[in-house]
Amino acid sequence: MFVIKCKRENMIPLIIVSNDQKRLADYIKKIIKDESFLSNFIYSIKPVKTELAIDQIRLLKKELKISFSNKRLFIIEALDVSGLEVQNALLKTLEENHVKNQFIFPLKNIEKILPTIRSRTKIINLNDFTNYKISPSTKTLLEITEKNDGLSFLNQSVIQSPSKEDLIQLLEEIIFYYRQRLAVDGVKASKIIKKIMSLKDLLQNNNLNPQLTIDNILLFIHKIYS
C-alpha cells in the first residue's frame, strides 16, 4: 500500500477519503508505524456532537504553539461535516506550515471540503470504485435524457421532490456513469461532470433547491446530446 513519506521539515497535511472505517484505520496505523510517531505525540480530535466546534480549533492552535523535539500527529475527524467557520479557522492553521506537526483528515466526502484546504493537502482516496454500481433507475433516467426528443425525462419518478441527501447520492452515481464514458465520449462527458460537480458543491454549501438542481443538470445533459 502506498504511504506518503513526510519529511520532518515539511509535513504535508493528508486528507484520506474512505467509506470503509477498517480500511481507513489500518491505513492510518501504517502511517504511524512507517513514520515512527510515538503514542504520546498522537492527538485525536473528534467532534463533541456531530461536527467540530470552533473552540476545538482554538485549543488546537494553543497546542501547536508548544514546541516539542518530537514530531506530532494530529488526526482531525469529521471535517467534511463541519461548518465553514471551522474550516476557515483550520485553514489559517495549515497556512502557518508548522514544522514537525503532521495533520491527517479522515473523511467520507471530499466535495464538502473548502478548495483552499484541498489545495494545501495531499488527497488519498481509499475507496474502491471498481465495485461501484449504478442503479437501474439512474441508468434508465440518463438513457432517456440523452435520447428522448421531448422533455419526458423531467417526469421520471426517481427525480420527483428529491431530498438533499438522496440527490447527492444520485449525483455521485451520475458522475461515476460519465467518468466511465470519458474514454469514448470525452468532451461531452467531461462537460457534464464539470457541470454536476459545480452544482453539487452549491447544493451542499449554499442550500440550492434539490429539484431545481436535478432539473438543471438533466436539461444540460439533454442539450449536450441533442
Image (cartoon, rainbow, N blue to C red):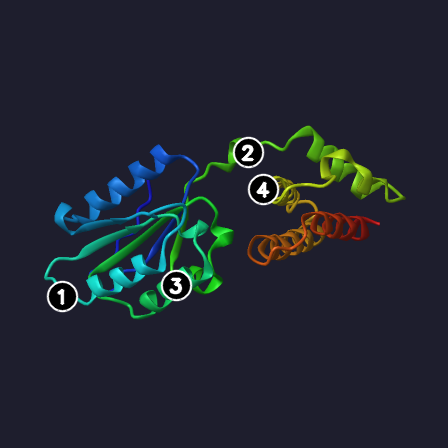
- The CA distance from mark 2 to mark 3 is 29 Å
Residue 90, percent across and down? 36, 63
Q: Amino acid at mark 2?
A: Tyr
Q: Which dot, 2 or 4, sits closer to the camera? A: 4
Q: Amino acid at mark 4?
A: Glu
Residue 18, percent across and down? 42, 41
For label 1, the SS is loop
Can see residue 9? no
Q: Earlier in the sequence, mark 2 or mark 3?
A: 3
**Residue at image mark 2:** 132
* Residue at the outermost left position: 69
Closer to the camera in the image, 170 or 142: 170
> Relative to 186, is 99 on the left or the right?
left
**Residue at image mark 4:** 165
Q: Earlier in the sequence, mark 1 or mark 3?
A: 1
Q: Earlier in the sequence, mark 2 or mark 4?
A: 2
What crowding class fits label 4: few (fewer than 14 Cα within 10 Å), some (14-19), or many (20 or more)? Answer: few
- The residue at the point 46 percent across, 56 percent down is 113
Q: Amino acid at mark 3?
A: Arg
- The residue at the point 60 percent across, 42 percent down is 176
- The CA distance from mark 2 to mark 4 is 18 Å
For label 3, the SS is loop
Q: Which dot, 1 or 3, sits closer to the camera? A: 1
Cβ atoms at labels 4 and 3 below 8 Å apart: no
Q: Amino acid at mark 1?
A: Ser
**Residue at image mark 1:** 67
Residue 124, percent across and down? 40, 48
